Image: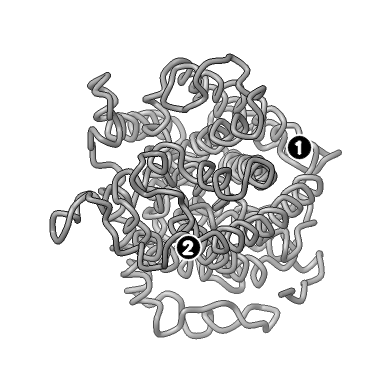
Amino acid sequence: MSVTSAPPDTDSADLRGFGYEPQLRRSIGSYASFAAGFSFVSILTTVFQLFAFGFSFGGPAFFWTWPLVFAGQFMVALTFAELAARYPISGCIYQWSRRLANATVGWFAGWVMIIAQIATVAAAAIALQVVLPSIWSGFQLVGGDPALTSTTGATNAVILGSILIAITTIINISGVRLMSIVNSTGVTLEIIGVAAVVVLLLTHAERGPGVVFDTGGTGSGLGYVGPFLVSALMAAYVVVGFDSAGELSEETRDPRHTAPRTILRALAAAGIGGGLMLIAALMAAPSLTDGRLATEGLPYVLTSRLGETGGRILLVDVAIAIAVCTLAIQTAGSRMVFSMARDNVLPFSGALQKVSPRTGTPILPSIVVGVGAAAVLLVNIGQPALFTAITSVCIVMLYIAYALVTVPLLVRRLKGWPSKEQAATTERGGKLFSLGKFGLVVNVLAVVYGIGMIFNLGWPRPEVYDPAGAHWYLHYFSLLFVGGALVAGALAYLRYRTKAMSLHLSLPVPAVAEEVA
């Protein structure tokens, strides 16, 4: 559904009201904005990558973690949609947090988000290893076992992932128009692929939908709570990144109206499509007890049910989805780096805030995110146990960054944010997205869900972080990684604290969307 676009000069004047001169090119429309959020979630990428993880811990009944996580994240998305309508600025998590709370909270929200996005680019690129060798054995460039849990599989994943990141970096620095065309095309193919997977698997169903009540021998009654919470990590890994439409606000036409709608539509589409794909796979799996579903996941279901040719065609679509997912995450991360550098609160801000006059994009931030993600991948050479750990911690970091927005928003809401006038209109007289009287309830649910999931994700379970019992530090990897990131952030913040505080105190107050005094 399209929205009426505001004139470009009006969007530019709106941005100047926040104290920023327009530098990025506004070439993103409603569908491209939707595609940015949908491709970050990328159910074809992440469900294919992590289905086996969820099933191995919770059996078929792990399906119920999907609607529960989706409901919790939709509460978060509703609050983000309200903020996207009032603060249409790149680097939205950082910008929203510092305006709702203070300079310190905002800086750490941005810092945590940058690290999370870099790690998530690496985690998305890893997914190629789950798909490409199943399409053609020649993609196993180093030979040996292609499974991610093997040394050769882990090494090959690093090679394939690094090649993909190099390609997405080139696309990103070539301009937002090329990026949006590639991303939108990939998302269209992904949506077609999701529909095809669901329909084809349902036509090959072995069992009825009642399979979702089977715990697969993993527990019963209260004894199933533990396995269920662990299996919920699969859904939690998938349902993130819907805020990407907000990250691209300064490149979106009429972002006050476009971004809120596309944030919610992207998450809703991913939630419905992912749920249908999960239940269809469980109904069509050749066996629930032979162990292959817990190790090979959805590629096994596709190739066994649809034949080698049909399965491989759909796996090609999955590979495309992985590529555009990696592209979207890298784009969002580069805009976060640019937004903070523009405020001169990052190392080398002078270089990072520059926008290419030819492409209209921040080139160096895209390179920094790409190089950082490749470095994360290189750590995994010959270390298959690190893959699940890195996937887990990057999502923990995303949830922490989200909480650094939803918690300050709740505090502000208790003080009367937004006023009735601000909730209803903009300076152009158009309606802004608003939760109205439901805002407080939604915000409370978003905070409770987010904090609960942070603990669930970060809890140092050996079966998640160190299933082979290889290294003590893997067992506590989430705590060590998050703690290290925060300590590094604290040291960096000391360098830029004065600048961040002075910037916060001088925040402009636009005609709409009140700021912190």
Amino acid type of disc 2?
Gly
User: With respect to residue 505, does 330 lie above or below?
Assistant: above
| Label 1 or label 2, whichever comes before in sequence order | 1
User: With respect to residue 131, does 194 lie above or below?
Assistant: below
Residue bearing the label numbered 1: 171
| Front one among 336 and 495 | 336
User: With respect to residue 82, does 447 lie above or below?
Assistant: above
> Left or right of 172: which side holds 298?
left
Amino acid type of disc 1?
Ile
Q: Quadrant of residue 411?
A: bottom left
Is residue 335 visible from the viewing direction of this image? no
Disc 1 packing (10 Å; few <14; some 14–19; many ≥20): some
Query: Which residue is outermost to the right?
Result: 358
- Residue 275, which numbered label? 2
| Count of labels in the image | 2
> Left or right of 29: which side holds 324?
left
| Front one among 9 and 81 | 81
| Front one among 97 and 371 | 371
User: With respect to residue 443, does 247 lie above or below?
Assistant: above
Disc 2 packing (10 Å; few <14; some 14–19; many ≥20): many
- Residue 272, which numbered label? none
Residue 326 coordinates in the image, percent (x, y): 61, 40
Q: Identify the residue at image location x=65%, y=34%.
A: 135
Residue 258 coordinates in the image, percent (x, y): 67, 69
Q: Identify the residue at image location x=52%, y=24%.
A: 146
* Disc 1 to disc 2, C-alpha distance: 31 Å
> Left or right of 267: which side holds 481?
left
Is residue 332 visible from the viewing direction of this image? yes
Camera-side mark, 1 or 2:
2
Q: Identify the residue at image location x=75%, y=45%.
A: 179
Residue 147 coordinates in the image, percent (x, y): 47, 27
Q: Secondary structure at mark 2?
A: helix
